[in-house]
Image (cartoon, rainbow, N blue to C red):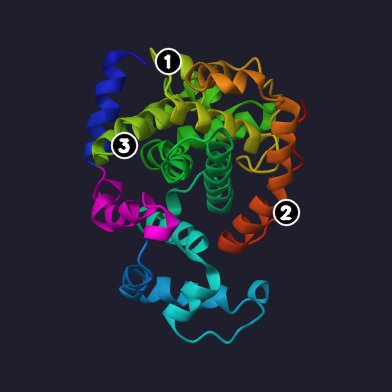
Amino acid sequence: MNEKLQFQLRAQISQMDSISTAPAILMPLLEMLRLPSDRISLEKVVELISYDGAIAAQCLRLANSPLFGRRQTETVRAAVMALGLERVRSMLFGLCVNRVMPQDKWVIPPDAFWRHSLGCALVTQRMANKIEYPEPEKAYLAGLLHDLGFLVNSVLYTDGFRECLRLAAEQHLALHVVEEQVLGFSHCDAGQMLCEHWGLSKELVDAARCHHDVCLLPKAGPLACLVHLSDLLCRVRYLGYGYEEFMGVDLGGDAAWQALVRSYPALEHMDLVRFTFDIDGAMDQIVATVDAVFGAKTMTAPASG
């Protein structure tokens, strides 16, 4: 991205009336998301949900759905206990961001966006646990936030971004590649600037910026690498952006994996086939969790590769 376009985009993000005010709504939730599950106060979650009737109603609807045996749940507290904190916090994040995203500006279908975001969060967390990364909850959050730049591009460049999605789907290309060609920047650049505008940590900013190319960083940290690999695995296994990409994944040859090995030398001796198989084995559970939170939807076949 040239300097003029970079300056223009950063200025536009700082003046976005809807998304620029998101921290007032999201920051308490983001603070909660950063905590390990055993440190999250159930009463605080119930209080947060109870502030908003629409969110409370959504929790009750989901808790009373056939997925949870139609328990006849009648209180927010009972709904939270029935759903579990992982589902609740994911749903809360989705609903809060939906509030600050004008509904007529969505370019990527909202369900596809949230399925990919939550899927990536869950895969990133699972991979973090597999390699014994010390902060799996931070890994979850980085996976959840990595594509926030799509919101910026949808609001500020609606028509151009819609054309990007059309071309990418028509040609089965990676969306960020088409964005660079059409807009002159990608959702990675926009996501980096939005995360900086919100005052998020450097690790989260780096994950948003470099989740498609960790080589952009002088030294890629484990979090950006985990999000990059999780994003790839999701996109080739039913949890992409709602269209089929022609792509493949060579985990051992990927720069992100090689950077992880430098940080965690024991990974050099890991059986990559077994590692990938374990992630694959969890994918059904991950898809079920995503469907429970955001509603089941028939997706396209996984990308070939």
**CA separation, marks 2 and 1?**
35 Å
Secondary structure of residue under mark 3: helix
| 182 sits left or right of 192 in the view | right
Badge number at residue 216: 1
- Main SS category, magenta section: helix
Q: Amino acid at mark 2?
A: Thr
Residue 31 part of the magenta-drawn span: yes
- Give yes or no for contact between labels 2 and 3 (Cβ–Cβ under 8 Å): no
Look at mark 3 in the image and give the residue it sits on.
194
Locate the N terminus and report the quarter of the image it occupies: top left
For marks 2 and 1, the one nearer the N-term is: 1
For marks 1 and 3, the one nearer the N-term is: 3
In which quarter of the view is residue 46 placed? bottom left
- Looking at the rendered image, the disc whose residue lies closer to the viewer, 2 or 1, is 1
Horizontal and vertical percent position of residue 150? 45, 39
Horizontal and vertical percent position of residue 170? 68, 31
Q: Amino acid at mark 3?
A: Leu
**CA separation, marks 1 and 3?**
18 Å
Look at mark 2 in the image and give the residue it sits on.
298
Residue beneath the point at 23% across and 55% down = 24
| 304 sits left or right of 96 in the view | right
Residue beneath the point at 46% across and 40% down = 139
Residue beneath the point at 64% across and 74% down = 68
Above or below, comparing residue 209 to residue 118 in the picture:
above
How many residues crowd around disc 3 within 10 Å: few (fewer than 14), some, or many (20 or more)?
Answer: many
Q: Amino acid at mark 1?
A: Leu
Q: Is residue 218 visible?
A: yes
Secondary structure of residue under mark 2: loop
Magenta segment: 16-39
Badge number at residue 25: none
